[in-house]
Image (cartoon, grey):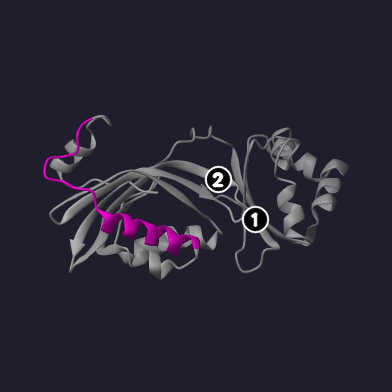
Amino acid sequence: MRFLNLATALLVIISLPACAPAPQGSHESPEIEAGAAAWLEALNSGDIEGVVATYTADARILPPNAELATGHDAVRAIFGGMIDAGLGGSIETVEIRAAGDIGYHVGRFTLETADGTTVDQGKFIETWRLVDGQWKISNDMFGSDLPAMAPVGTTLAITHEVEDADRWLAAWQGEGSRHELFAQHGAPHVRIFQNSDNPNLVEVMVDVEDMEAFHAFLSSPAGAQAKTEDGVKDETMSVFEEVK
């Protein structure tokens, strides 16, 4: 999940059509390929220090909808947040090339929850630099393929415990899911999260277009029935509203 921007010459190389020949003097790099595999394994195993180890000390991270960030602390904050949210995923390499002490890696990513639900997919590009005999990521930029969500009135983060995490997660899958139910009552965009240490502790991030309709649903018999069916523990619920 990445993208980057280094030297003008490298950008020119990367911007060539997919059918163009590889840059003169460059070669495939099994070392960078192995480094990318180590990055993914560390992310999926929840090893944030393993992720950090694949970056140079002055690495630049260019995430979507956020400012450029620099250094290992930025890596910990951005990818550690994904790990804390129970997210992992997969990557598909499009091209890896190296020349001298610099290389690049272009590909696609899929970001998933622990149960395999896709929450994002997109593309990335990284530059890699040879440092003391080891290839490390020096620039990393990534962006989503999914359409941007329409502006909403309010974003709510609702945390609570459930009786059975598998039952609760199942309610958000397939036809007739809670996604559809929320959309029918003023909340068309919902993202779900699960605590990696306590699977029965979950969070729902809800973009609400019609707050009156959404509140009416939550306090209605239908809303109460949905919570009962999903095993929601009402007494553990906390609701946070985004501060704008």
Frontmost of labels 2 and 1 is: 2
How far apart are the alpha carbons under marks 2 and 1?
Answer: 14 Å
Circle 1 crowding by C-alpha within 10 Å: few under 14, some 14–19, many from 20: many
Which of the 4 image quadrants contains residue 239?
bottom right
Q: What amino acid is found at the position of numbered circle 1 in the picture?
A: Glu
Relative to 144, 172 lies left or right: right
What secondary structure predominates along the stretch shown in magenta? helix
Name the residue at 66% across, 67% down. Answer: 198
Q: Is residue 77 magenta?
A: no
Residues shaded magenta = 20-44
Relative to 210, 125 lies left or right: left
Question: Which element carries disc 1, helix, strand or loop?
Answer: strand
Name the residue at 49% across, 57% down. Answer: 82
Relative to 8, 125 lies left or right: right
Looking at this view, is 20 or 147 the one in front?
A: 20
Residue 134 image point, x, y percent: 23, 65
Tag 2–tag 1 contact (CB < 8 Å): no
Residue 69 image label: none
Residue 86 image point, x, y percent: 56, 59
Q: What amino acid is found at the position of numbered circle 2 in the picture?
A: Val
Residue 159 image point, x, y percent: 67, 58
Residue 53 image point, x, y percent: 33, 67
Name the residue at 26% across, 61% down. Answer: 136
Residue 203 image label: 1
Question: Which element carries disc 2, helix, strand or loop?
Answer: strand
Circle 2 crowding by C-alpha within 10 Å: few under 14, some 14–19, many from 20: some
Identify the mark nearer the N-term, 2 or 1.
Answer: 2
Residue 62 seen in the figure: yes
Residue 239 seen in the figure: no
Which residue is tagged 2? 119
